[in-house]
Image (cartoon, rainbow, N blue to C red):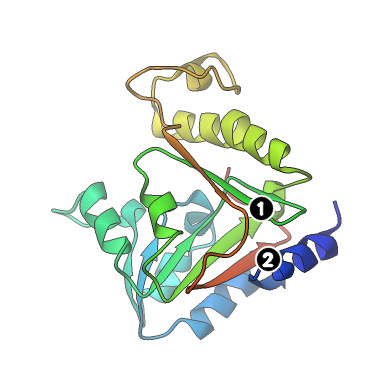
Amino acid sequence: MDINITIENLKKKGYSVSYFERSEDATEYLNNIIDGKTVGFGDSTTLFSIKLFEKLKTHNEVFDPQNCQIGENFNDIAKKCLTTEIFITSVNALTQTGEIVNIDDTGNRIAGSLFGHEKVFFVVGINKLVDSLEDAIYRGKNIAAPKNAKRLGIMTPCAIKGYKCYNCSTPDRICNAMIIHYRKMSNIEMEIILINEELGF
């Protein structure tokens, strides 16, 4: 996997791309360029692991479904995230040819990545990079989704039996929709933050 080819292909598809060896540097970069904004997070373990919320909240109004306050719930915060100036999320997989794949349960991550913001940032660890779109879909269904289900304590076959997709019809199923970004959405800025560390699922 050639990171330079991936960056070149992403730029051809209209994205801005910033590459960092360390997550600390990526966090500092985002903290410096996002100031005095309303910011929504896309329920991401990657963002949680790099402690971006704690940095940004000191000088921005930040909404994160993983950081609900007393009296708030996930859906309330997730809805606020859809109307912010900036939206930040991660991905289930990113291909060397420049496609992004995300699978979602409630739809807040997918919806926030498509429309309505001044700018969207995708923060991506090196473990999310794959060769092809087929590999990206496979990774989303058979690696990312099962790990998320297990993290959430959800009783799906993928979480209980092992890490693979059973295409289940259980009430707890979290693979309810999948989005493929073939290229940057029109009329919105989008930047890919690539980090040379394994982050998230």
| One can see residue 26 in this view | yes
Q: Pick whichever, 68 or 18, lies toward us.
A: 18
Is 58 displayed left or right of 129 in the figure?
Answer: left
Q: Is residue 43 visible?
A: no
Which residue is label 1 attached to? Answer: 99
Question: What residue is at 57 percent from the left and 31 percent from the top?
Answer: 141
Q: Which residue lies at the image location 54% right of the left edge and 13% below the top edge?
A: 161
Q: Quadrant of residue 171?
A: top left
Q: Amino acid at mark 2?
A: Lys
Question: How many marks are shown on the rendered structure?
Answer: 2
Which element carries disc 1, helix, strand or loop? Answer: loop
**Label at residue 163:** none
Asked if residue 166 lies left or right of residue 125, the reply is: left
| Camera-nearest residue between 12 and 140 | 12
Work out which quarter of the rendered image holds the C terminus and state it. top right
How far separated are the C-alphas under marks 1 and 2? 9 Å
Q: Residues within 10 Å of mark 2 (few under 14, many from 20)?
A: some
Dot 2: element: loop
Amino acid found under the numbered disc labelled 1: Glu
Residue at which label 2 appears: 13
Left or right of 130, for residue 188 = left
Q: Say whether residue 90 is left or right of residue 12.
A: left
Q: Residue farthest to the front?
A: 186
Mark 1 and mark 2 lie on one chain; the one further toward the N terminus is: 2
Q: Residue furthest left?
A: 71
Image position, residue 144 (x, y; %): 57, 37
| Residue 121 location (% of width, % of height) | 52, 67
